[in-house]
Each structure stands twice: as structure tokens, then as C-alpha cells.
Image (cartoon, rainbow, N blue to C red):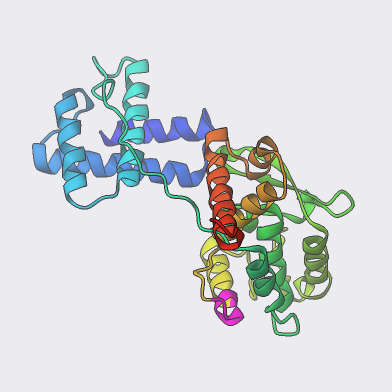
Amino acid sequence: MEQEIDSFIRFLATERGLSDNYQLSTRRSLTEFAEWCSSAKKITAVNDVTQPLVSEYLGARKRSGLAAASIKLIVVALKIFFRFLAGKDAIKRDPTETLSLPRIERYLPETLNEIQVETLIESIDTTEPLGLRDRAIVELLYASGLRISELANARLENLNFDERILRVTGKGNKMRLVPVGRKACEAVAAYLSTERPKQVKRRTSSEIFLSSRGTKLTTTRIWQIVKARAKHSGLETNIYPHLLRHSFATHLLSNGADLRIIQEMLGHADISTTQVYTHVDQQRLKAVHRKFHPRA
């Protein structure tokens, strides 16, 4: 099965142009399935995989405590893998053809309110070492609703200060333009003019945000920066980069922005993904009503 998996991952990279993270996740799911087939069932050929075998594997993963969302990712990986093999006649029959995706309970995303966002941003001391950088990071995450990977890969040549627009590469290597608020532009400009030049080293690339060594910030490091700044702010809420993206969308919606526009700014392929924020906003409105209406 290993050769077929390698061939499929090459297809995802070259023909579909899917992201490295997606390729790694899919390879992991398929490799774990192949290893289970080999060790538990002594099966190593794709033609020997049957629908009952796949169901047994998924049942074993569920009993091991794997969440429904993670099982869904495995099912998707297996379905597109075997559909690929069937398409090139490498197998007689697709064993996942009748396999259904597990139902996943949708949880409403957490958000910060506007006062909490203001508190977080204003608590960052820009006179501290890398204070300008860290404030610019938080400002941009909230102002443009960026994913952490999009922020890490944001480049100087893609930022237009005159138009206040940033071109980012999202999931599936899809490019989109996102607006950058005035305060975020000011924060980024202050960082670029004052701190970033001191971080530049001989081999520094054109990523906007750099480490003290002049290298591109990793997503893990950005996550650590946001957590550290949130802790210093005194806010008791669990704050992380994606929470700022959720807050960006929710605040836009509550202030009257069209859902389709928010979908475009977030880079969601499906409007149903964006619609979760309407439920968040409804909850907020109900909470306000309960608190302030005399007969609530």
C-alpha cells in the first residue's frame, strides 16, 4: 500500500495543489490505516481491502477514544484515496463507496467581546523588546481575521499600505485579498520601520514577522506569543490566535456586515462554515435581552 499512498500524495501536491499540511494529514491517516491492515490483518495490498475491513478499523479507532471529528478526517482521506485508485483502475471496487461520514456535533466558536480585544491590544507595551512586533501580530490577526499560518507566511510584497490590503495564501493554496484596518496598518508600519530592520540577517526572507534570529516566525511561536501577551493582559479568558479570527467575524456580523462578504474575507469555501457566526450573534443578542429587558 505504501507505493500507492506515495503516488496519491504526489497527485494531491502536483495535480490538486493542496497545502503541505493537508498532504501531511492525509498521509498520516492513510499510513496508520495501512500499518493496521498489515499488523492486525496481514493485508498489504489495496485490492484486498474490503468495506467490512474499513468499518472494523474505524470502529477500533472510535473505541480507542478518537473524536468524531478526527474519525471524519480519516474517512475523508480513505474515500478520496480509494476513489483515486478506482479512477485509474488500480482496484476492482472502491471499498469506501457506501461509507458514510460520521455526524459531528457542531460547537459554537468562542469569541472575545470588543472591550476584551481592546484590553488585550492595549496591554502590550510597545517599549519592551519586540513589543511593536507582538502588538502588530495581534492587531493584524484581529483586523483581518487571518489564520495563524496565513500570518506566518504574510510577505512584505503582498502588503499594500495605500490600499490597506494584504494578499494571503489560504487553504488549498487559494489566494485572497483581505482588508487591513487603519490601526493594524499603523501597528505594522511602526514595527517595520523600527524593529524589523534590527532583526534582519543575511539570509532573512521577506516575511513580515521575524524572530529575533531573523528567521520566519513559526505558527507555534506565534501561538506562544499570543498566549504570553494574553496572560500579561490579565484577561481570564483562554486566548489563542484563532479566537481572534472568530472575534473578527462575530464583530463584523454584529455590526451589520453581510455574511457573504465575511465568507470572502475568511476564505471559507462554503457559506455553511461562515453561518456558524450567525448562531454566535443570536446567542449574544439573547443574552443582552435577558440581561436588560424588564420582562425577559
Q: Is residue 6 above or below residue 235?
A: above
* Residue situated furthest left in the rendering: 41
Q: How many marks?
A: 0
Question: Which corner quadrant of the image does residue 99 belong to?
Answer: top left
On the image, the x and y values in percent for residue 146 come to 64, 53
- Whether residue 203 can be seen here: no
| Helix, strand or loop for the magenta stretch, by majority | helix
Query: What's the magenta region?
Result: 229-235
On the image, the x and y values in percent for residue 228 come to 55, 77
Viewer-proximal residue, 30 or 242? 242
Residue ID at (53%, 35%): 272
Residue ID at (68%, 54%): 154
- Whether residue 285 can be seen here: yes
The N terminus, quarter of image: top left
* Residue situated furthest bottom in the rendering: 128
Q: Is residue 158 left or right of residue 283?
A: right
Q: Is residue 151 above or below residue 75?
A: below
Question: Which corner quadrant of the image does residue 28 belong to?
Answer: top left
On the image, the x and y values in percent for residue 174 come to 62, 37
Residue ID at (33%, 46%): 70
Viewer-proximal residue, 230 or 281? 281
Viewer-proximal residue, 239 or 292? 292
Q: Is residue 294 left or right of residue 190?
A: left
On the image, the x and y values in percent for residue 27 come to 36, 42
* Residue situated furthest right in the rendering: 162
Residue ID at (70%, 60%): 140
In the rendered image, residue 84 lying in the magenta stretch gets the answer no
Q: Is residue 282 above or below residue 215?
A: above
* Residue situated furthest front in the rendering: 295
Q: Is residue 40 above or below residue 231?
A: above
